[in-house]
């Protein structure tokens, strides 16, 4: 009986787990620049985050909160959002000088398209910086200004 109660309460904790504060701040920023942030399963299976260029919608898979990767996931998609702003409707690299950490290399090298690889390299580079939030915010401010 006790076991069931404990199991039930931990389930509740998982369900009410709120997005971290930084996550909410960045989400607000994105919405300010006309992006819609949807916390739901992305239309493409097996992805944590997804930006749909055509209608500026960003999907964040709810599983990222349980995996404790909500922040880097949103930072990553924010970089793509900035790339979209920079390209005025098309994805364009931002010309960032930073490189992703070694462990993230295989994640963007799996993209065979060179242009896509460059876009992903920038997103992974920003998400793996210690000041990733400030960087992502600054990039949005710089490229998405009206
Ligand atoms: Zn990406």
Image (cartoon, helix red, strand yellow):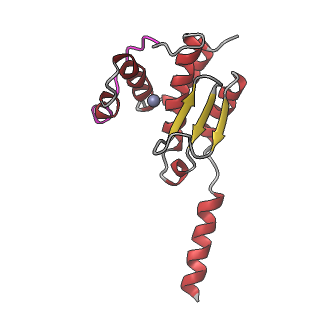
Q: Is residue 95 magenta?
A: yes
Which residue is nearer to you in this view: 137 or 66? 66
Q: Tell me the quarter of the image containing the C terminus.
A: top right
- Residue lying at 59% horizontally and 19% vertically, measured from the top left: 140
Numbered marks: total: 0
* In the foreground, 43 or 109: 43
Q: In this picture, is 126 found above or below 22? A: above
Q: Position of residue 115 (x, y in %)?
A: 38, 16
Along the line of sight, the residue nearer the viewer: 48 or 24: 48
Q: Quadrant of ligand 1?
A: top left
Does 3 appear above or below 133? below
Q: Residue at x 56, y 76 (%)?
A: 7
Q: Was residue 96 drawn as part of the magenta stretch in this picture? A: yes
* Residue 100 % position (x, y): 35, 27
State which region is magenta. Answer: 94-104
Image height of 28 relative to 84, above or below: below
Q: Main secondary structure of the magenta part?
A: loop
């Amino acid at each position: 009986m006790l076991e069931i109660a404990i199991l039930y309460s931990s389930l509740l904790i998982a369900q009410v787990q709120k997005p971290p504060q930084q996550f909410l701040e960045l989400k607000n920023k994105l919405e300010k620049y006309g992006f819609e942030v949807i916390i739901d399963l992305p239309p493409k299976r097996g992805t944590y985050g997804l930006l749909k260029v055509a209608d500026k919608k960003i999907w964040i898979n709810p599983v990222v909160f349980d995996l404790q990767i909500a922040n880097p996931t949103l930072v990553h998609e924010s970089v793509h959002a900035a790339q979209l702003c920079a390209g005025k409707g098309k994805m364009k690299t931002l010309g960032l000088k930073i490189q992703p950490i070694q462990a993230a290399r295989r994640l963007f090298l799996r993209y065979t398209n060179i242009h896509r690889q460059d876009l992903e390299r920038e997103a992974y580079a920003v998400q793996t910086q210690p000041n990733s939030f400030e960087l992502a915010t600054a990039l949005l401010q710089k490229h998405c200004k009206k």
